[in-house]
Amino acid sequence: MRNFPHNFIAIEGNIGAGKTTLCKMIEAEHDCRLILEQFTDNPFLPPFYKNPERYAFPVELFFMTERHKQLQQTLSQRELFPQLILSDYFFIKTLLFAKNNLNSEEFRLFQRLFHTLNATFSTPDLLVYLHRDIDDIFNNINKRGRDIEKDIRPDYLQSLQEAYFNYFKTEKDFPILIIDVTGVDFQDDRTTYEQITGLMNRSYSKGVHRAAVAVQG
């Protein structure tokens, strides 16, 4: 497979969409620098899922500072190491989750901090969003059986999905590729995986583009 025509690809999606799995599969076949979010390091995450109103601000603040540090370390060296950078998140995720989880006063403060930190980052050459319907996502979450995710509700997943799509309507600065992977298992199906990477191998104009992969069977 030829190299991707992009220098920085961020893969996004709802919880349980398969972001990290896809990144690891691509990294195994390509010479790239991989950025994986260390979400399990957030000490506020388990209590947040049980009591979101109480723990929303610390959980989002922790995520923001850790994501910024991780991205800053890698993206600042792009010129020194001109290879593909592949990430299973992008920094805008910080603001989308915060807007969804914080009250209005908390979000105003958080937004000021976010924009200060975000000003140091360049945009991705391609943002890929793996879309699954809520039932599919909820099944994936239950299947992987992580203790910290056992209290996630379908309505919370729905609100996150809406936050992403509302953001996509406003973003015009770089290409966004929404790939519908509902009902497919690209981890164990080579044909499906190659459909996804084939879509990522194309060049796109700025704005939103949509695609779907065929369910094998």
Image (cartoon, grey):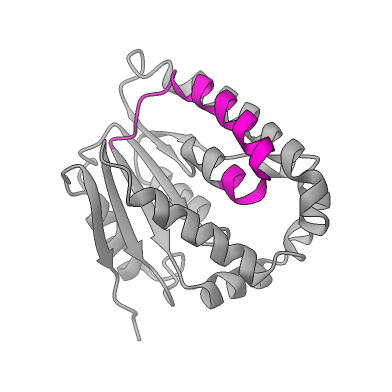
Outermost residue toward the top in this view? 80
In this rendering, the answer to whether 135 lies above or below 147 is: below
Q: Residue at x 30, y 21 (%)?
A: 82
Query: Is residue 90 shown left or right of residue 111?
Result: left
Residue 36, can we see it? no
Query: Is residue 150 shown left or right of residue 121?
Result: right
Residue 99 lies in the magenta stretch: yes
Q: Position of residue 28 (x, y in %)?
A: 42, 46
In this rendering, the answer to whether 54 lies above or below 143 is: above
Depth order, front residue of 178/34: 178
Q: Residue at x 23, y 46 (%)?
A: 207
Q: Quadrant of residue 7?
A: top left
Depth order, front residue of 161/39: 161
Outermost residue toward the bottom in this view? 217
Residue 167, can we see it? yes
Number of numbered tags placed on the structure image:
0
In this rendering, the answer to whether 83 lies above or below 20 is: above
* Magenta extent: 97-125
Q: Position of residue 121 (x, y in %)?
A: 42, 23
Query: Is residue 198 shown left or right of residue 129?
Result: left
Residue 52 lies in the magenta stretch: no
Q: Residue at x 82, y 55 (%)?
A: 51
Q: Position of residue 208 (x, y in %)?
A: 25, 52
Depth order, front residue of 167/43: 167
The C terminus sits in image quarter: bottom left
Q: Position of residue 6 (x, y in %)?
A: 25, 36
